[in-house]
Image: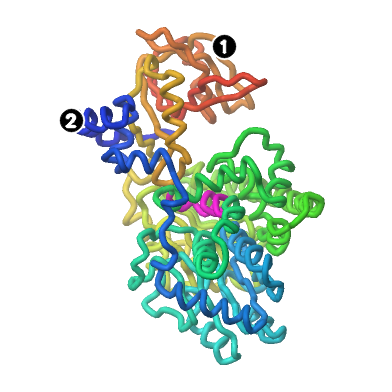
């Protein structure tokens, strides 16, 4: 697939010189720091040397005082507390963190995860009724609740109070809960707005610990926060970067029994970074709620002993294997539908429906179709006599606005610019397919339909040294808004050892004219270039610089993102 290369704006020489001298870092990496808003010595020191002291005061969050006072009251009065959260990774890690912390000193609490299929996302009437029947008078809602005003009112009439810990964008009406912790509230002046749902849960217990216990108790749960930050694709900036930095350290050096068991069952040998969490731990935790009930994930994450964790990890891994099979089979079917239909192949959007597709993986399938065809995609299936679906977008296209244009055909929908969910009546299916394609076709540009590779800086092979890699590694953790830097180099050729593997990928020793340096290079899904590479034609490439350890030997490796021949 053709990709557009876009060079980011390069800072002025004067800016680069000043910062480079101040922090003693080479000009190339200094330019990247400036591109990311690191403009002076203090910014750079905070960036390269994260500290838990950089975490913001939790009491800066609106309603925090109310939240911890109500929690303290519940504990002192021996009320039953229900820790309630969403069934995805962010929700289950948030529930696990808050429950584990409170349960250490107060056992009259329980967890509740709504059933994806019977209850759907967020606070449910079934959950509130369960709480009432079982005598719970305080519910702490994590990663959900900000848009549940009516249900919060129902709970209030039943004598149940809510503390809401959410990170989604609120409506104009804030629920009438005891406390609503959400930095995205217009009336909340908390200095960092992009915490994960688990991050909000962490701030709640941080405030409680500061006021009533010992803050040091919290840091054992930072591995859960890191997993949530990675899996919920929130920016790796500011407070998230600090939490992720120390959370990854905990995850790699001394993980909780549940996460340790997951790492072992995933046969992870090297240290995990944000990307590693996204592709190994995240899907396994998510799988519990996708193909069965997410409570299994929470039970794993709150496990106290290694034996208990190992047994639970086996069960979660079986669910993940099942999820992968569903994912693979449905993706194949979806691609076949497109390939066998000329109208679908030429469309600007993809809207596919099959009533037997598994609801738990349609979001993954939508993302896979975007990867292959690079256009806004909606994958639909049947659930409870309705059609339900997940939608994914491409860079620059506002998916939520497009779905809003179809709202008269929908029963409910929600989401944001790049991902959304929707429900409609089966009789509106064809109308929705037509309307969505019309809206996308009239608003999307050809540029949006072409994948983009953003290049941070040009880089000559002579500049790629162990010292360069050492500084680059200190820019981690990498993720949204702090991505691994992408470089461009010209006049590259295959020096030696060209091979293809799995009929999709290439690997070779790469050299550059005018340089004595030779590096192992690997290009995933780039086997289409094998013939020209074998002729040693000169080419340009975009790539990242990484460290590769194999058989006990560590070396510099270039991960190729794209190739263009001269």
Look at 38% across and 28% down and name the residue there.
Answer: 487
Look at 44% across and 48% down and name the residue there.
Answer: 236
Q: What's the magenta bit mostly, secondary-structure-wise?
A: helix
Q: Residue under label 2, please give it.
A: 14
Q: Nearer the viewer, mark 2 or mark 1?
A: 2
> 22 or 333, which is in the foreground?
22
The quadrant holding residue 119 is bottom right
Look at 32% across and 27% down and name the residue there.
Answer: 24
Residue 520 lies, with reference to residue 542, above or below; the image says: above
> 335 or 173, which is in the foreground?
173
Residue 188 belongs to the span the image colors magenta = no
Q: Quadrant of the C terminus?
A: top left
The quadrant holding residue 517 is top left
Crowding around mark 2 (Cα neighbors within 10 Å: few <14, some 14 to 19, many 20+) is few
Crowding around mark 1 (Cα neighbors within 10 Å: few <14, some 14 to 19, many 20+) is few
Q: Is residue 105 left or right of residue 37?
A: right
The quadrant holding residue 56 is bottom left
Please provide percent x and percent y for residue 322: 73, 51
Question: Which residues fall within the magenta stretch?
Answer: 225-235
Dot 2 or dot 1: first in sequence order is 2
Question: In the structure shown, which secondary structural element does the residue marked by tag 1 occupy?
Answer: strand
Q: Is residue 123 left or right of residue 311?
A: left
Residue 115 lies, with reference to residue 364, above or below; the image says: below
Q: Residue under label 1, please give it.
A: 497
Q: Is residue 268 left or right of residue 446?
A: right
Q: CA distance from mark 2 to mark 1?
A: 42 Å
Please provide percent x and percent y for residue 303: 74, 57
Question: In the structure shown, which secondary structural element does the residue marked by tag 2 occupy?
Answer: helix
């Amino acid at each position: 697939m053709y990709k557009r290369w876009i060079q980011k704006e390069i800072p002025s020489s004067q800016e680069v010189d000043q910062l480079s001298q101040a922090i003693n870092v080479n000009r190339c990496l200094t330019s990247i720091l400036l591109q990311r808003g690191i403009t002076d010595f203090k910014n750079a020191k905070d960036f390269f040397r994260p500290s838990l002291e950089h975490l913001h005061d939790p009491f800066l969050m609106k309603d925090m005082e109310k939240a911890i006072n109500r929690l303290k009251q519940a504990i002192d009065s021996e009320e039953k507390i229900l820790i309630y959260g969403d069934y995805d990774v962010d929700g289950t890690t948030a529930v696990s963190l808050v429950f584990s912390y409170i349960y250490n000193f107060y056992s009259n609490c329980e967890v509740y995860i709504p059933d994806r299929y019977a209850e759907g996302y967020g606070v449910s009437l079934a959950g509130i009724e369960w709480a009432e029947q079982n005598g719970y008078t305080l519910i702490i809602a994590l990663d959900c609740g900000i848009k549940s005003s009516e249900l919060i009112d129902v709970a209030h009439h039943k004598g149940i109070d809510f503390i809401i810990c959410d990170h989604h964008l609120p409506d104009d009406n804030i629920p009438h809960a005891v406390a609503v912790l959400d930095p995205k509230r217009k009336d909340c002046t908390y200095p960092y707005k992009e915490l994960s749902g688990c991050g909000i849960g962490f701030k709640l217990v941080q405030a409680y610990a500061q006021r009533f216990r010992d803050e040091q108790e919290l840091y054992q749960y930072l591995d859960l926060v890191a997993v949530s930050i990675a899996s919920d694709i929130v920016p790796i900036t500011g407070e998230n970067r600090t939490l992720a930095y120390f959370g990854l350290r905990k995850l790699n050096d001394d993980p909780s029994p549940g996460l340790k068991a997951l790492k072992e069952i995933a046969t992870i040998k090297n240290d995990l970074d944000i990307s590693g969490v996204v592709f190994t731990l995240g899907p396994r935790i998510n799988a519990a709620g996708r193909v069965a009930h997410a409570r299994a994930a929470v039970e794993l994450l709150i496990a106290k002993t290694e034996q208990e964790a190992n047994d639970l990890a086996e069960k979660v891994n079986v669910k993940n294997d099942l999820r992968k099979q569903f994912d693979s089979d449905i993706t194949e079917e979806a691609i076949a539908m497109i390939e066998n239909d000329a109208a679908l192949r030429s469309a600007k959007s993809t809207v596919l429906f099959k009533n037997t597709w598994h609801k738990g993986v349609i979001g993954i399938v939508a993302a896979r179709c975007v990867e292959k065809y690079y256009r806004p995609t909606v994958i639909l299936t049947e659930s409870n006599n309705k059609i339900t679906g997940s939608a994914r977008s491409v860079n620059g296209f506002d998916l939520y606005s497009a779905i809003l244009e179809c709202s008269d055909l929908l029963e409910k929908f929600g989401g944001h610019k790049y991902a959304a969910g929707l429900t409609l009546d089966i009789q509106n299916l064809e109308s929705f397919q037509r309307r969505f394609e019309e809206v996308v076709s009239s608003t999307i540009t050809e540029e949006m339909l072409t994948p983009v590779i953003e290049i941070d800086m040009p880089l000559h092979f002579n500049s790629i040294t162990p010292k360069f890699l050492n500084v680059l590694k200190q820019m981690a953790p990498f993720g949204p808004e702090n991505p691994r830097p992408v470089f461009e180099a010209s006049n590259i050729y295959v020096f030696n050892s060209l091979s293809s593997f799995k009929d999709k990928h290439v690997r070779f020793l790469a050299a550059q004219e005018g340089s004595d340096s030779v590096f192992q290079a690997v290009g995933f899904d780039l086997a289409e270039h094998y013939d020209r590479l074998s002729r040693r034609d000169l080419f340009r490439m975009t790539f990242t610089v990484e460290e590769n350890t194999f058989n006990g030997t560590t070396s510099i490796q270039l991960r190729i993102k794209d190739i263009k021949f001269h």
